[in-house]
Image: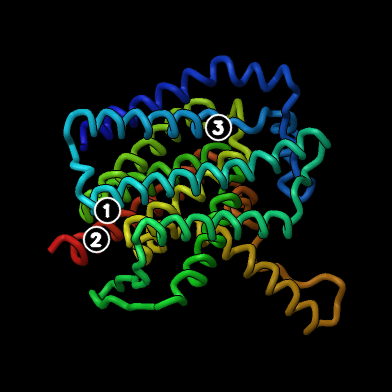
Amino acid sequence: MIWTSVFAACAAFALTWLAGKWFIPFLHKLKYGQTILDIGPRWHKEKKQGTPTMGGIMFIIAAFVSFICGMILFHALGGVDLSNPVNMQELIRSSAGLMLAVMMGFMGFLDDFIKVKKKQNGGLTVMQKTVIQVLIIAAYFATLYLSGDKGTSIMLPWGYNWDLGLLYYPIMGVAIYYIVNAVNLTDGIDGLCSSVTVVYMAAFAAISGIVGAYGHTLLSMCVAGGCIGFLMWNFPPAKVFMGDTGSMFLGGAVCAMGIGCNAEVLMIIAAIVYILEALSVVIQVSVFKITKKIYHTTEGKRLFKMTPIHHHFELSNWSEVKIDLVFSLVALVAGAVSVLLAFYLFGK
């Protein structure tokens, strides 16, 4: 399986990279440029305004095609016996994970499309996004349940299997909702979301191999390959942005790996960069509102210069490349910890 996954990853990389040669000029021709928020760093509006968005379409298609071809190749070579219910269930779980990511990406596409048509940074409303995401998450869990996967327990780091019963679905649903939107927030500077996601997917390629989830190994490698191909066009200074189309897809893929491999706690550890990005926004807003009430002023205090937290470091004179490297290094450490825990929990 590993060589099939490597081949698929290389294919996803090549397809994404090559697609940029014609797709980016195509977006320019359509005038599908990004409208930059006024509340962001002022140089974003000066330097990034009009950069083509929705570039995530490139790696979504590449990852999808590479996954399907990789799965066909793997089965054609006799890599797995589909008459075995366990193998068939893994095929369904990984395919459902891919569709979770694709549907999240489609929602992001709708958001991006509305933005570029209106020439403003306001697409779907928060309520509209929430309703659509809840429906997508429910469909994902329903697919897993109908496939025979009725597991409602999570493995804790000290080896205890905690059965949540029916509470598993709303708790994990909230976790998916949070992480998907956290990945979306991470896509705020050139190359950041792509580079962090490559590290995350590399960690879960190892974890899925440890737990024997062959389909998820293939999926993680395809997404990683697509992200590396996209970095060829998105590394600072970016020639194209992934948009909500790409970041929502990646958020879905991140969650699909954790839930699909029954490694929910490891997902939270490996996704620490995304989680902290979103948490910084929550903390900033909370501190602002609390201090506003305490001091009875129109303006509250701010803990960070700007959130999500990568903007704080931007305003502290960190370059985009430095932020990409440091955040990826944090993701690498978190990913290594999650892989070591996977050996401890599942490698016995």
How far apart are the two marked residues, 1 and 2, measured between alpha carbons? 6 Å
- Give the residue displayed 36% in from the left and 48% down from the top: 92
In this picture, residue 225 sits left or right of residue 49? left
* Residue 302 location (% of width, % of height): 70, 67
Secondary structure, mark 2, is helix
Secondary structure, mark 1, is helix
In this picture, residue 226 sits left or right of residue 293? left
Q: Nearer the viewer, residue 73 or 21?
A: 73
Label 2 or label 3, whichever comes before in sequence order:
3
- Give the residue displayed 28% in from the left and 27% down from the top: 7
| Amino acid at pointer 2 | Ala
* Residue 76 location (% of width, % of height): 22, 28
* Residue 231 location (% of width, % of height): 48, 31
Label 3 or label 1, whichever comes before in sequence order:
1
* Residue 345 location (% of width, % of height): 21, 66
| Amino acid at pointer 1 | Ile
In this picture, residue 122 sits left or right of residue 209? right
Is the residue marked by circle 3 packed among few (<14), some (14-19), or many (20+) residues within 10 Å?
some
Report which residue position mark 3 lands on.
236
On residue 207, which mark appears? 1
Report which residue position mark 2 lands on.
342
How far apart are the two marked residues, 3 and 1, measured between alpha carbons? 30 Å
Single out the residue that lies furthest toward the left: 348
| Amino acid at pointer 3 | Pro
